[in-house]
Amino acid sequence: MTPRIVRPHARLTAAWVILCAWSVAPLHAQAAPNITTPKQAIGFNLGDDYMMASYTQLETLWKKWDSESDRMTLVSIGQTEEGRPQYMAIITSPENQKHLDRYRQIAAQLAHAEGLTDEQARALAREGRAVVWIDGGLHASETVGSQQIMETVYQMVSRTDPETMRFLDDDVLLAVQANPDGQEMVAGWYMRETDLTKRSLFDMPRLYNKYIGHDNNRDFFISNMAETTNMNRVMFLEWFPQIVYNHHQPGFGATGGVIFMPPFRDPFNYHFDPLIPLEIEQVGAPYQAFILEDLAPRYNVAPSQSVPIVVAHNGGRQLVMARWGFHPVWMKTSTLAPINAKAETVATSRMFQAAVKHHRCLVPADGFYEWKPVPGQRRKQPYYLRLKGGGLFAFAGLYTPTDARAGAPATCTIITTTPNDLVASIHNRMPVILERDDESRWTDAHVTDPATVLPCLRPLPAQRMEGYPVSTLVSSPGTEGPRLVRPVSQ
Ligand SMILES: [Zn+2]
């Protein structure tokens, strides 16, 4: 279950702003390759409503693209339990394709780490390519997986944007359908209805992996099944990918589609080497950031989620993503990461005193919620508070920077103070909203004396703010959307 934390300041809304602009020069000037689209080959786009491609169609597409693209090598890694070839698309730049054996050998040498000096290992890391395994469709009813692996291969062989070209230069992608039999069954079951609206994944009368069905993920420790044996051989005897992504999502019984992606919430399995969860976070954090950087407005940010913060950087400022909940590397992982710090004690607190000197940040937002007790009731009434007329402002925050060596993501906390008269009628604390003129002082890296910056931490005057009651929907983590900040009558 999801921990549910509802407390003052536990939600904020934010208008994400991009504070920096960059230009990307194409790494290669390349004409778009002539690649058959899924629609041309099988009659629909992958991901179209009411359509699901079968493994037979995957085979059609992958063989076609293999013949059309010099970025792709198609191999079978063995037979499935029902006797189908289990395909793996090896995708990398045409130049890298010529040296696949060498890159495989380097990945193996680095994985075994035997008989190598540090220097040799570093030289191999420079020469090699990152081997990235992405599979899809293991749990065949989690249907995004089998469709995304086809779409991913299509995009990698057809796109020419700078990012794709960099992926192709830097990486060797191993794209694998993890359960071909299951895809064939589930797609066949789903598509059996000609009336689109009657198509449903429910009630399929067979296990979608021979003997074990949904337990095919549990098979990876013992490798009873042909598919598992094929994949384990490729991963742990042949290719040694540095990144393994095994797709899961809530199945068809769940409401809505949620795809799991790190960073994950604590607790981790502490029997693992600490580098494992931390490196998983390192890989996942940019993806989560990319999604957030699509900059959909957020209306209900909960603790442990990523928020953009503004920090001092090389004499200027930089927008970075940070996890909300202050978590220095020295802090025990079992300790709750504080989402707030009190202005009155921040300079003397063991937790925050170093950050007040060296790691102050802005947390941009355009509003926050506070909950007011309702006499005679257990429920509290949420209020939305913002600048009068609305607009972007910055909370005063503290952060821990990303620690690349420890693999720890940046984290942050928001400073609170005594409330102004407006907020006092709702709650006994309020977050510090910085005066515009104080924002540069607060983020000035040359200022390390708390006495210089503590005066910034005061309540914004009540006459510059406004607040109104909003729907109690905001009390549920995960609810989102502009309806959360619409006024409601009490
Ligand atoms: Zn699953």
Image (tube, rainbow, N blue to C red):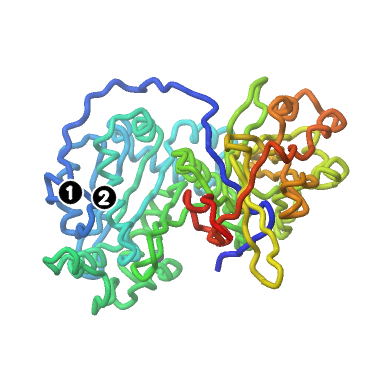
Identified at 47% across, 23% down, the residue is 22
Position of the N terminus, as image quadrant, is bottom right
- Most extreme residue toward the front is 489
Residue 159 pos. (x, y %): 27, 34
The amino acid on which the numbered mark 2 sits, given as a three-letter code, is: Met
User: According to the image, label 2 marks what residue?
Assistant: 150
Q: Residues within 10 Å of mark 1 (few under 14, many from 20)?
A: many
Compared across the picture, whether 275 is left or right of 79 comes to: right
Q: Tell me which label, 2 or 1, sits earlier in the chain.
A: 1
The reply to whether residue 83 is in sight is: no
User: According to the image, label 1 marks what residue?
Assistant: 61
The amino acid on which the numbered mark 1 sits, given as a three-letter code, is: Leu
Q: Are marks 2 and 1 in contact (CB under 8 Å)?
A: yes
Q: Residues within 10 Å of mark 2 (few under 14, many from 20)?
A: many
The one nearer the camera, 473 or 167, is: 473
Residue 301 pos. (x, y %): 57, 50
SS at badge 1: helix
SS at badge 2: helix
Identified at 85% across, 46% down, the residue is 349
Position of the C terminus, as image quadrant, is bottom right
Compared across the picture, whether 169 is left or right of 53 comes to: right
Compared across the picture, whether 274 is left or right of 448 comes to: left
Identified at 67% across, 51% down, the residue is 9
Residue 255 pos. (x, y %): 39, 66
Residue 250 pos. (x, y %): 40, 64
Q: Tell me where residue 205 sits by quadrant.
A: bottom left
Q: Quadrant of ligand 1?
A: bottom left
